[in-house]
Image: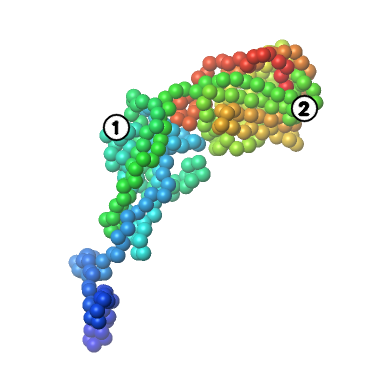
Amino acid sequence: MGARRRGATVVAVGLAVVVLGSGAGLTLARLTTSTTLGSNAFTAAASFDTVAPTVSATVISKSTPYFASYVKQAGTYYVYANATDGGAVPSGTATIKADVSAITTGSTAISLTAGVYSPVQGVTYGWRSALLTASNPITAGAKTYTLTSTDFNGNSRLQTAFPVTVDNTAPAASDIQTANGGATVGRIERGDTITFTFNDVIDPESILTGWTGASTSVVVRFTNVANSDTYAVYDGTNTTLLKLGSVNTKGNYVTAATTAGVGATPSTMVLDTATNKITITLGTIAGTVATDAANRTAAWTPVATAFDRAANAMSATLVNEGVPADPDF
């Protein structure tokens, strides 16, 4: 029985806080909070967390990545966030709520759920909203949203002016060009380049699943069609057609089916977001090629399954190679 009393005394002392004043006196303050477990009541030391959480990173991303921070009217999107609770004894982030009413009318307190969410442009997030839908109509341009984070001790912080851009304009093809990088003008060779130019930044995920825009291996297939040979682009395994459409060369460059990128040297593809260009550098040529050094004006037919940063579908309108006409490859 005596041991039980001594244990109780230790608990009581453990809940006491010593406060030293400026004088010689000594004050004992007891900070407690009550809780229950089943039918038993307990008294425990209160949390000393007085600092609200801080959102360290956040982004709005359309439901079909890669690029974030852009949405379109009636488009679907998520709100992502990372947050840390502050203070010497943080109690942890309990809730994060987003006010996205500038993007989705009436959405002033959207709850985010804790978890581990796949990287968005390289960043892994610990909180995400349910799938949301942007208003329709909604004017294009810069918008902002806010986040309120609250910890388990009730401390909350409002952070404002997080940016997102609404873009409602469909992208389109602008130009198709080739350049000689081999030994002979007008002949398909390793080192030649093909450049697809758009009037807006194209999301690389829409061209090739998992592509970030960095250099990646591809295969270009050339098809012999009399004096109007065509080509299209496939993934590095030469099995999946990329969403770049097809190009009519208006010339005679192959006499049988030919590939560029199957063999020792793959063809490579890279996206330049500063110029809205996708450039392919040809690798190993396998097939039967011909030389056509005449001035040609190629024609590129895009596909509507490609999209821009806001998920606006690509215009499928054909575009001719920019003037003046010149030898290709």
Farthest right residue in view: 183
The correct choice, above or below, for 258 with respect to 163 in the image is: above
Counting from the top left corner in percent of width and height, residue 125 is at: 44, 47
Is residue 325 at least partly visible in the picture? yes
Residue 224 appearing in the image:
no
**Residue at the (47%, 47%) spot, across then down:** 124
Which is more N-terminal, label 1 or label 2? Answer: 1
State the count of labels.
2
Residue drawn at x 28%, y 55% as measured from the top left: 155
Q: Secondary structure at mark 2?
A: loop
> The C terminus is located in which quarter?
top right
Going by the numbered disc 2, the residue's amino acid type is: Gly
Foreground residue among 17 and 255 = 17
| Residue 298 versus residue 313 in the image, above or below | above
Q: Is residue 215 left or right of residue 104?
A: right
Q: Is residue 168 above or below residue 325?
A: below
Q: Is residue 93 left or right of residue 247?
A: left
Look at label 1 and name its amino acid: Thr
Q: In the depicted view, which residue is nearer to us: 27 or 311?
A: 27
Q: Position of residue 231 (x, y in %)?
A: 66, 21
Specify the label residue 182 is tagged with.
2
16 horizontally vs 62: left or right: left
For the point 66% across and 33% down, the residue is 268
Residue 229 quadrant: top right
Q: Residue furthest bottom?
A: 2
Query: Which mark is on residue 105?
Result: 1
Q: Which quarter of the rendered picture does the N terminus lie within?
A: bottom left
Estimate the x, y position of residue 74 in percent, counting from the top left. Answer: 37, 27
- The residue lying furthest to the top in this view is 227
